[in-house]
Image: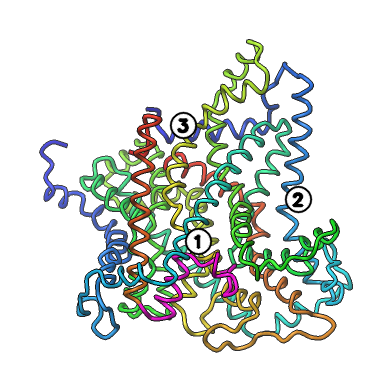
């Protein structure tokens, strides 16, 4: 069997170089072939545009006046440019609070995942670790079985973690998928590195912290990005475990505005629509964009990390 | 490794054992203990007596569930939603991967890829917001219908539309990301195979059949096993975000029912029983799917 780590590297290299070269030349250029190419590009262009449309539409609506929106005239460009929706949304005290909460949960959860992940991946990467197989089996089983929504909820309740940040970040901190990613990367490091460090008398903590982790920054960044985006976007845990409105992340607030509902317990402020400008639709779209904003803005720069991460993760899995 | 005793290993490798303490503890508490926690499905759980003190009632809640007036409805909805999601949703990522693979302009391919998996990274709440916007009375879909001469449709009060909405949404979100794993398999095909096929006079279509498809067949098989076994495990979040009481007839699934009855309704034991039933069936499906795969193609998950 080809060493998966090496095969991955090869595939990534091939992907990388192929960007800078022409793709394979086909000498058999029949008419059907050319026709297919044209249709393919057309179809994919339409596909891309349909993916992008909701985003552009959201921007347009968030900046438009009410009447054109109600008439369905707003598609890609705002009509009757005004910023009232944003003014109202920003002045709603809860948005800043919710934003702050989301950032807090995301950062804390990511840190936990990274710490737990690195600590777990290092021993798993040591071939002479006695408990390696046992631990792997132990961590794999929960990927296929879990107790369900209610036992977990009851556990959190009995641990007094309800309505705290821990209910949001702890259960997800031990996921095996991240550990596998990190372990694969640790294993790909040259053996000689750790051997010579050991011969110099370094113990494992030192090797982990001073050698292995600094060399693994790309994969750790990848894990951090996946984790933080995942937590930022999460909705159901907050729905289940949080009760105070001022602890709610922005996804819950956004949900309230979209469904035009007050959260089941009292909320602080749902903006009231004005008559002519700043309709509820505008405010919805504005809040959507605020929720999306951080992710979409950095996406072009970080998407290669996601792509590579999924590549490695899927091959290994 | 011979002669290595556990005790010896504990002494020399104690640092390693120390390092795995967090993950072991965490997994024990948050993954394994809830497995034990399904015991509440067999109890009359109440918060005062807790998991260890509540009265044991055996299969009472399962029987209650089987006799529930909504039993057939939610099973049917969950099953149909899962089945249609599989039938309609399994192959678009494959098709997208194949089409992207055929692109000659690599810049365009990169751009298309990047944009295609953008939806995977946005929250389901946002996606729900998009859906409500696009399908609203003044949204782009209804406008298009009016333009074609049809009446406007109220997508959120007629139960018949829910499945299509749900499936289209999951496809929109997952097609780009799902195509990555197939693209990964496709980049593993060596260009020499294509070149020699071309020299042998194979048309592009034949190349696709004889080289490209076999290359991703193993991936397709594994993904299909996973997909089939999770038919019943329709996700809670998207259904919850898209449904409303008017369309419970088609939209209410096991997970949302558990939420309403078991959590909001504080009927914990009942909810746990329903959830457990779902897990068991999902596992059985996984085993069956793997058995079928082994029988028909000689290989599977195990």
Q: Nearer the viewer, residue A16 or A49?
A: A49
Up/down of A164 relative to B31, above or below: below
- Locate the N terminus of chain A by quadrant: top left
Q: Nearer the viewer, residue A244 or B168?
A: B168
Q: Quadrant of residue A12?
A: top right
In which chain is the residue bearing label 1?
B
Residue for badge 2: A49
- Name the residue: 57% across, 48% down: B89
In which chain is the residue bearing label 3?
A
Residue for badge 3: A7
Q: Which residue occupies the extreme right position in the image?
A: A80
Residue B156 appears at what percent x and percent y? 66, 69
Q: Is residue B259 magenta?
A: yes
Residue B120 appears at what percent x and percent y? 59, 55
Residue for badge 1: B77
- Name the residue: 47% across, 56% down: B79
- Name the residue: 51% across, 65% down: A231
Magenta segment boundaries in residue numbering? B241-267
Magenta: main secondary structure equals helix
In which chain is the residue bearing label 2?
A
Q: Is residue A183 magenta?
A: no
Q: Is residue B229 left or right of residue A305?
A: left
């Amino acid at each position: 069997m080809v060493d998966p780590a090496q095969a991955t590297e090869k595939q990534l290299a091939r992907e990388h170089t192929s960007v800078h070269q022409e793709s394979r030349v086909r000498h058999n250029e029949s008419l059907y072939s050319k026709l297919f190419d044209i249709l393919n590009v057309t179809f994919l262009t339409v596909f891309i545009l349909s993916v992008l449309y909701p985003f552009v539409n959201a921007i347009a609506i968030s900046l438009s006046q009410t009447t054109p929106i109600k008439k369905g005239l707003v598609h890609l460009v705002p009509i009757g440019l005004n910023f009232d929706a944003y003014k109202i949304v920003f002045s709603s005290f809860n948005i800043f609070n919710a934003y702050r909460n989301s950032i807090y949960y995301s950062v804390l959860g990511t840190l936990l995942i990274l710490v737990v992940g690195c600590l777990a991946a290092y021993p798993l990467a040591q071939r002479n670790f006695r408990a390696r197989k046992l631990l792997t089996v132990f961590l794999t089983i929960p990927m296929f079985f879990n107790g369900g929504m209610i036992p977990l909820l009851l556990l959190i309740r009995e641990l007094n973690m309800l309505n705290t940040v821990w209910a949001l970040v702890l259960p997800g901190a031990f996921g095996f998928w991240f550990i596998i990613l990190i372990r694969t990367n640790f294993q790909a490091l040259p053996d000689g590195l750790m051997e010579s460090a050991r011969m110099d008398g370094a113990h494992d903590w030192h090797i982990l912290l001073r050698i292995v982790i600094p060399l693994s920054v790309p994969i750790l960044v990848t894990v951090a990005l996946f984790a933080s985006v995942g937590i930022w976007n999460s909705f159901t845990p907050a729905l289940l475990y949080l009760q105070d409105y001022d602890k709610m992340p922005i996804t819950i607030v956004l949900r309230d505005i979209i469904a035009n509902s007050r959260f089941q317990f009292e909320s602080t402020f749902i903006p009231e629509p004005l008559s002519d400008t700043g309709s509820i639709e505008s405010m919805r779209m504005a809040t959507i964009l605020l929720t999306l904003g951080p992710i979409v803005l950095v996406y072009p720069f970080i998407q290669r990390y996601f792509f590579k991460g999924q590549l490695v993760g899927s091959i290994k899995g | 490794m011979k002669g290595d005793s556990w005790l010896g290993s504990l002494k020399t490798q104690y640092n390693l054992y120390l390092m795995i303490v967090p993950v072991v503890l965490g997994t024990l508490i948050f993954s394994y203990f809830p497995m034990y926690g399904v015991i509440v499905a067999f109890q009359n759980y109440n918060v005062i007596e807790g998991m260890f003190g509540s009265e044991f009632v055996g299969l009472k809640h399962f029987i209650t569930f089987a006799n529930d007036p909504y039993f057939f409805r939610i099973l049917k909805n969950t099953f149909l939603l899962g089945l249609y999601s599989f039938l309609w949703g399994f192959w678009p990522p494959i098709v997208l991967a194949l089409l992207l693979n055929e692109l000659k302009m690599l810049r365009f391919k990169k751009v298309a890829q990047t944009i295609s998996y953008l939806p995977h990274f946005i929250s389901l709440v946002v996606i729900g917001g998009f859906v409500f916007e696009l399908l609203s009375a003044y949204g782009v879909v209804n406008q298009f219908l009016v333009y074609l001469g049809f009446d406007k449709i109220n997508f959120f009060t007629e139960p018949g539309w829910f499945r299509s909405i749900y499936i289209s949404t999951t496809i929109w979100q997952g097609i780009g990301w799902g195509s990555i794993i197939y693209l990964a398999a496709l980049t593993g095909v060596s260009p020499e195979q294509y070149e020699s096929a071309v020299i042998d006079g194979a048309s592009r279509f034949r190349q696709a059949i004889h080289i490209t498809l076999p290359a991703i067949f193993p991936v397709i098989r594994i993904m299909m096993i996973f997909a089939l076994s999770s038919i019943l495990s329709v996700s809670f979040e998207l259904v919850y975000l898209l449904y409303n009481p008017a369309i419970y007839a088609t939209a209410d699934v096991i997970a949302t029912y558990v939420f309403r009855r078991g959590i909001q309704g504080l009927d914990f034991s009942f909810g746990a029983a329903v959830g457990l039933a779902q897990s068991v069936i999902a596992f059985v499906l996984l085993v069956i799917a793997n058995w079928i795969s082994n029988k028909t193609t000689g290989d599977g998950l195990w």
